[in-house]
Structure formats: C-alpha cells, structure tokens
Image (cartoon, rainbow, N blue to C red):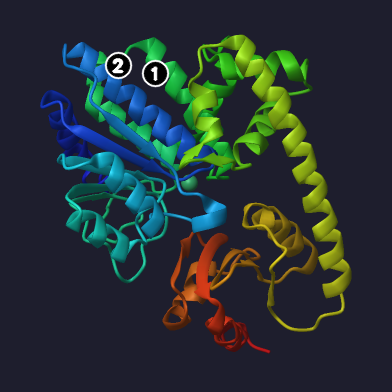
Amino acid sequence: MEDKIRNIELAAARIKKAVLDEEQIAIYGDSDMDGVASVTILEEAVCNLASLLKKKIPKIIIAFPDRDKEGYGLNERALAFLNKKKGNKKSLLITLDCGITNVKEVEEARKMGFEVIIVDHHKVLDEVPEADIIVDPKHPLDDCYFKEYANAGLTFKLVEEILGDQMSSYLRSTFIELVMLATIADMMAEEEENQKWIYEGLLNINKSQRPAILAFMEILGPMNSKREFVNRIISVFNTVKMKDHRVITYDFIRTNNFEEAKEKVKEFLQDAEDRQNEIRALTENLKEELKNDLSNVVFKGSRDYRADYLGAVASRLVGFLGKPVFLYAQKKDLSRGTVRVPKGIDAVKAMDSCKEVLMMYGGHAPAAGFTVKNENLEKFKDCLIKYFGK
Ligand SMILES: [Mn+2]
C-alpha cells in the first residue's frame, strides 16, 4: 500500500510548470457541491502560487457541464465552448470530479490541442481515456491506502503537493471548509482523512472567511447543529443553475461582497424550497404508482422530468421500494438518467452489462448516471430486467 495517490506528484509538477511558464489553464468541474469546491480550491491555489512565484496570474478558463442540457461530465457542447475560449493558444485542461468515463471526449480535447489532466474519484470503467495524466484513486493501478476521497479532498491533496509548505494556514482553512462541505455532500465514508477534514471544517465554520458562508449564517439564523447548517448549504449547492457554462454557485462561493451574498442566499433558499416541493410531489406520485409493482427494478422516464432533481427522487424511492431505481428525463433524441440502488448492489456494474446500448454512463456503486438514445430505451430496460431478474 502506498501513502501517495498515483500520479498526484506528476500532476502537481505539471500544473506548477504551467504557472511558471504562464500557460493558459482550463479547469472543467462537475456542477455540484463537490465539483464547485474542487474548482474553487484548484483555481485559488493556482492564483496563489502565481503570486508566490511573482508570475502573472495565468489566464484560467472555468467551465461546468450544463447537466440539464448536456448531462454529466465532459461533452461535445462543453468542449466546443472550451475550445472557443482557448483560441489558438496551447492550453492545459484539468477535469475535476468528472472525466474518467469520457474516452471519446478526452480524445477530442487532445485533438483540439488541450493537454488533459483528469482528477476524478469516480469508478474507472473498462475503457480508460487516453489523458496525459490521470489521478483517480479508484484506478486499478492505484495502490493508495485510501480511496474514498471526495473529489475536493483529492484536489486538496493535489494543491498540497503544488504549494507544499508555502500554503498559508489561512488558505488551508478556507480549503478544508470546502473539502468538508464536499465530503459530506458526496456522502463519502467518514474515515481516515475524510473524518479529520470534516471535524476540522465543522469546528471552524463559524469563523469562515467566505462572505458566502457568513451570509448563510446570517440569513438562516441560529441552528440546532452545525451539520444541519451545512446540509442547508449543500442542498443549495446541489441545485444546479447554469449560465453560459458557469454554475452560479461558483461565483457565489468566491464573492467578496457580503451584501450581494445575502441577496443570493435569499434567492437560493426560495429556489431550494420550490425544488423540494417538486421533489416531494414527484416522489409521492411515483410511490403511489409503484407500490404494487412486482418487478425487480424500476425504470421510468418522462418528457416532463427534470434531470436535476431525479437523483433526490430516486434516492427516496430506493428507501421506500428497496430495489434499484432508474429515472430519466427524456429529451428530443436522447434521455439522461440517474440511478440509485440499495446497499449491496453496484449500479455501475449493472450498467456495464448494458454498455452496448448506452451512450455514456458512470458514477459510484450506490449512485450513478447514464445517457441513452431514445431508440435504445426499451433495449436498456430489457437488459436491466435481465440483469436484475424478473
Ligand atoms: Mn464528486
């Protein structure tokens, strides 16, 4: 067992070189709490390193997938966006909390002239993208003793390599705060460093330096527990709202304007409430509809479903029905879905057996996602019925 994650020093050295040479850097992260935390940590570390080294702050292109329009991970539209921003300059592309399943897209990115570093904590499928550097503790070649990091935890390990003992205690504590939020949000095992970071992050959250966190504190008022407070923040961050490949929570977490942050928090909390109501209504409808259903797997979609809250609905249904739940939002030509399964079942493995009919899939054993052409929906369903038994 190694105590270092495979390739993490290599990735750190490459990013350091990019800062030294004032190269352009594109950072592409998932649009949820873990992704936004990861992007923020890496971006702030890179800017910090540039000023420590008395270098120009590199041009950093930031983008996130529009989950509703594009689904999860690197994808064609996002690549076109990144490529346009890149111009004809040489550029690094670092994917955070996504990328490990994007074989085609990584190939495409490299053709566009990006040098690709994947930093991901998701399961590695049979086919691995040909990126320049891959950091993923779940890679079969990775011998690291601990594999259950949130991606933000992984990114923190990476920036520890990048900054070394030049990381100020101020910077460290603002990073740990984000790692704590992301580790709880992604429901990673509270063991080893995860446990340490969660403890430290929760301990210090009321001394946060981020106006965004302080604004939450002021608007929400006193809470019974720090966990409860943190869960409210997470539910906002996992509500993905996009504008031009930028998730609005990313600008929010980085803001220096307390008054503006307070206005945002009010807006977010209203949105979160509306969303909770929609989730509750859909869950109740589906419970009613499925309570007498005898099949071993739920596979259901609609043109009215919105991809961004299906995960929450599927989680509740798994608890109620005790069987795997596949829900999808049907678009014009394809459908995007989310999967939640009871303990002991591996959602990614189930989809491995159906990969011929899928465009894209991936995630974790208990929670995963997929993209499928509408013409293959029935085939996918049949395949799942076969896998889980009648
Ligand atoms: Mn994650």
Q: Quadrant of the C terminus?
A: bottom right
Q: Indicate the quadrant where residue 271 lies.
A: top right
Rendered residue at 68%/78% (across/down) = 297
Return the x and y of residue 116 as percentages of the image width and height: 23, 49
Query: Which numbered disc covers residue 172?
Result: 1
In the displayed structure, 272 sits above or below 99; it is above
Q: What residue sits right under mark 2 in the picture?
A: 167
10 Å crowding of disc 2: few (<14), some (14-19), many (20+): some
- Whether residue 284 sits left or right of residue 220 in the image: it is right
Instruction: Estimate the x, y position of residue 47 in percent, counting from the top left.
Output: 29, 20
Which amino acid, by three-letter code, is at mark 1? Arg
Q: Is residue 107 left or right of residue 365?
A: left
Percent x, y of residue 210:
53, 15
Tell me if mark 1 has few (under 14), some (14-19) or many (20+) residues whose alpha carbon lies within 10 angstroms of its own.
Answer: some
Kindly identify the residue that appears in the image at 46 percent across and 49 percent down: 65
| In-front residue for pair 231/376 | 376
Q: Is residue 4 visible?
A: no
Q: Is residue 50 left or right of residue 335?
A: left
Residue drawn 21% across the image and 12% down it: 52
Mark 2 and ligand 1: say if the CB distance to the nearest ligand atom is below 8 Å: no
The three-letter code of the residue at mark 2 reads: Met
Give the quarter of the image for residue 272. top right
SS class of the residue under badge 1?
helix
